[in-house]
Image: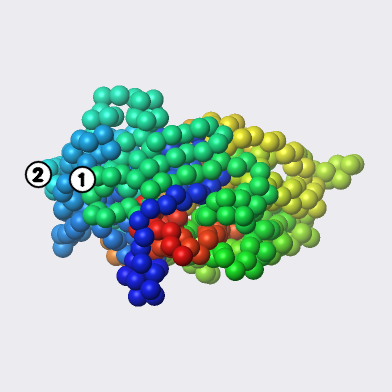
Amino acid sequence: MTVSEALAQGVTPRRGGTLQMMLTPEPPVLQIGVNQQGPTLAAAPKIFQGLITFSPTLEPQPQLAKSWTISPDGKEYIFKLEENVKWHDGRPFTADDAVFSITKFHVELSPRARAIFTLIETCEATDPHTLRIVLKQAFQPFLLMFDPTACAIVAKHLFDGQDYRTAPAVQQLIGTGPFKFTEWQRGNFIRMDRNENYWKPGQPYLDTIIYRIIPDSQSRRLALETGQVLLSQASDIEPFDIPQLRSRPNLTVDTKGWEYFSPLSWIELNHRVKPLDDARVRRAMSMAIDRNFIINRLWFGVGKPATGPVASTTRFYDANAKIAAFNVREANALLDAAGFPRKADGTRFSLKHIPLPYGEIWTRLSEYLRQAMRQIGITLELESTDAGSWARRVGNWEYETTINFVYQFGDPTLGVARTYVSSNIQRVTFTNTGGYSNPRVDALFEEARTTPAAADRARLFSDVQKILVDEVPQIWLTELSFPTIHDKKVHNVITTGLGPSKSFDDVFIAG
């Protein structure tokens, strides 16, 4: 519900109040770019902003850029920036900050940004409030790169000439957003207070946002039920608690707002570990998994079974390119034929597995996968870790199998290709950490990246999806649709395609 819709329904936006929320798990830092994990992308957009944001149908909407034009050949972008915007330290925001953020900060820190921003031939400030970008070639989804989670605009005067990962501003966050970073008591809470000099007149409405760090899932549920917190997001509430929360008259359960991210979960496989370099083994492991069971019994109907590397909510999804169906008998036969017979104890081989440390549901998922793999003679040895260690180990290739989920950002070039192209095999989390390599896949993704016509891109993405579902470089599990649960007196929570990862400058408490 937008502000105008709220007014039409007799709910007047009211200034004041503290919005108590939750953040699960606690992120290592809140500087987008330095950290790209889900909790950071949820909380940091209250502090930092992008040039634009997106509607639920992924139409671009103004943020720090109040307008933009695109040349007929699709190569030149002119962004007119908001005037009278100040950083939280009082310095003026200018186009120089945008140029620095795009050409230096995110290019160094973000593999996702680096892969796209290498297409830029010219990025310049033609005046303090005009940004001009010229591409080497037309790139259809270019605007999708400028939301705050992909390219948060950072202050040049705080980062230029420093190590971006260790600069003081990484801990003392300074943005242009509606809320100022105030305090972080590790293991307890993160506090943000109203930016009194925010560039939107009269906003934000809230005085304060407090993110509570509550490690125990049942304590998080109790906090929501009793009103200690008024909003939960993403992994805060375990799926098995959702049915009861839906029945509470004071709560709204909303699964919208993930249109931009379209998160897809999978078993992350390290192809350097034998026998995971064998496509037959990967295919057999995939066939041993009952995805309907995962959705219905673990996620309680929230989300959908994955059918391949592209989510059904992402552009250019091909419904005809689907992974092999659940079939334990055929999976066993495939492993026999691949040369991995059962030993006397009934096992074929063992693999180490790191559950995703984002809540109990992910532990339950890994326990189910251990049972599923046992049916085909594979022993999964579970290793527990915390969120920071998980990111480090995956980024350093120090794993055999784990669980991951990655955002797709509206287009396969932006959120899918990075996991499968060999040029992105890096010791960085959320790249092609698995080490998968196929020259044909590389070529198809590259051609789709540089082809301007949507119909031609659709054909190329269809071809690449068919190859990937045959080779199964990762074992895709579910299309996630996280619930945002909030007290009904909290208004305007989900109004964009970024769900709770928006700025919250229009959120208010009334009623």
Give the mark nearest the N terminus, 1 or 2.
1
Q: Position of residue 472 (x, y in %)?
A: 59, 53
Question: Which quadrant would residue 47 be assigned to in this image?
Answer: top left
For image coordinates 67% across by 58% down, the residue present is 241
For image coordinates 24% across by 53% down, the residue present is 200
- Say which mark, if any, is on residue 85: 1
Looking at the image, do the residues carrying marks 1 and 2 touch, with CB atoms under 8 Å apart? no
Q: Is residue 359 visible?
A: yes
Q: How many marks?
A: 2
Vertical side of 129 occupied by 331: above or below: below
Neighbourhood count class around disc 2 (C-alpha, 10 Å): few under 14, some 14–19, many 20 upward: few
What residue sits right under mark 2 in the picture? 127
Q: Nearer the viewer, mark 1 or mark 2?
A: 1
Q: Position of residue 497 (x, y in %)?
A: 40, 61
Residue 259 left/right relative to 470: left
Q: Is residue 110 visible?
A: no
The span from disc 1 to disc 2 (Cα, nearest Å) is 15 Å
For image coordinates 26% across by 24% down, the residue present is 161
Q: Amino acid at mark 1?
A: Val
